[in-house]
Image (cartoon, grey):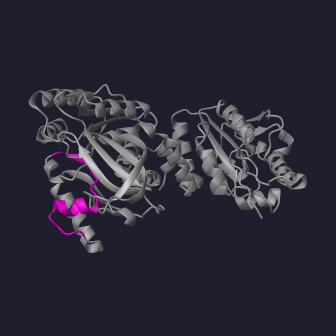
Amino acid sequence: MNGAIPAVRRFTGRRMLVVGDALLDAYLHGQATRVCSEAPVPVVEARYKTVAPGGAANTAANVAGLGGCVSFLAVVGTDEASDTLRRELAARGVSDEHLVVDAERSTVHKLRILADGQYLVRFDEGDARPLARETRRRFLERFRELFDGHDTIIVSDYHSGVVGPALIETLAELNARGEKRVLLDSKKLLAFRRCPLSVVKPNHREAAATLGWRPSRADNHLVELGEQLVRRLLAQWVVITLGEDGSAIFGRDGSYYRVPPRPVLNPQPVGAGDTYIAALSLALDAGADIQTAAEIAAEAAAVAATRAGTACVSQQELLQRLSQRGDPLADAADLLEQVYDYRQRGKRIVFTNGCFDILHSGHVAFLQQARSLGDVLIVGVNSDASVRRLKGETRPINSQADRVAVLAALEAVDHVVLFGEDTPERLISQIRPDVHVKGSDYTLERLPEAKIVQSYGGQVVILPLVEGKSTTAIVRKIARLSRKPAAQGIPSELPIEALPVGTTVQVV
């Protein structure tokens, strides 16, 4: 998964065009209280209702949530579902300026009824007929305008009338030379057989149905299935998602990769495919290779699958998950390649390091100041073994995976890298930052790495620390508070507000 986190950070501002079916997903949550006297079905007392963009609209919302700049082209009516969909898109950072309106058409609306968190039934309403002639003309005219201004296009086909022969023919014409990166999510793959495509993303059942096969998880079946799709389509890559078995990637050059599954407890798969193709598209647009892009997409879909209902994943959530899973952001070899690229582009590199055991406002202020000294901030983090040697056997409070995850999610931090030594001298010798930053609890004389930085012409900067803010002080305060209630004869639970963010408390 080389370069996953740097690639995700490059999602910001990527221009993407999403075209397809705009749906409104609604969920009516209730409680099953008894069996109906009129029929053997449960009576559900409604508690609350939630709504979210669905279909291609959810793909667009995920592109925006992951940091991209999305243009969303679809067709909607003038009904209440359309108004609600527009509000929900706006709340997720997606403009409705490219929605083509057909007053004679009703917006597709899917209502799911849940009792005690379990699905009972889904009602589908709305117009899924092919577009009327005038609506189709306006839609294709807008598609031609938007196509020229975007390098990456996602076609999200939910078979609600928008993605039809006219759009497919226009796409084949506009991308005849395959100059644009086009990703397709559709059950009707062979309808696109004359369109040069970068990626098609069916699930296993859809892929098998395309060729009239019965699905099988046997390896030889899967390989033959992928290879046949590559032959039948003008696609550079075929990515077959396999649910709990991960995914398989087949290339036109004959390459084949398997991406392992991301375990999720009680997965909620609604909309996870939209998240997957949004992240995959952004990763490819950001320069990731197909395998890294598929790994990133799998992580993003796993985040979505942890949510009830149709979910939108943010860039920071994806960065945090990648960090927790031990992405090679902690591998200096991958980082050095990125550092070389930064230098080629004239970027000023800042480095700092520490344990960052319980992240507090003093840390955040320090990192923001450090980031302001250059263009890229790299943070070195002591491994758990290193912290124990420096701080004692009771530390760290938070594991290295947790500490890295929290740091990686901060806007001021560009890269996080673990080191196992007590001091970052080896790491600094490799990275050779333009600026090495430490807090005012150090002096130049007490920094063994200072001589290394100065030897190649780098600068060492000592920044003031926020007074009274330290992990040690927080740990002592928690210990003091945990003893105080027992002494006063009052309940020993601490209010949540009393604990700083990131604190882990072990109750014995």
| Residue at (47, 63) in percent of width and height | 263
In which image quadrant can residue 343 be found?
A: top right
Q: Quadrant of the C terminus?
A: bottom right
Give above or below for 189 relative to 433: below
Residue 442: image x %, image y %? 83, 41
Which is nearer the eye, 315 or 451?
315
In which image quadrant can residue 216 be found?
A: bottom left
Number of numbered discs visible in the structure rendering: 0
Give above or below for 157 relative to 208: above
Q: Is residue 80 left or right of residue 457?
A: left
Which is nearer the eye, 320 or 148?
320
Which is nearer the eye, 442 or 163?
163
Which is nearer the eye, 19 or 368?
19
Give, as a single range, the part of the protein colored magenta. Answer: 195-215
| Residue at (23, 50) in percent of width and height | 186
- Can residue 248 be seen here? The reply is yes
- Can residue 180 be seen here? The reply is no
In the rendered structure, does residue 397 fall within the stretch colored magenta? no
Q: Is residue 52 left or right of residue 436?
A: left
Residue 277: image x %, image y %? 34, 48
| Residue at (55, 32) in percent of width and height | 346
Residue 26: image x %, image y %? 35, 43
Q: Which residue is situated farthest in the front direction here?
A: 37
| Residue at (66, 51) in percent of width and height | 403
Q: Which residue is situated farthest in the right direction here?
A: 487
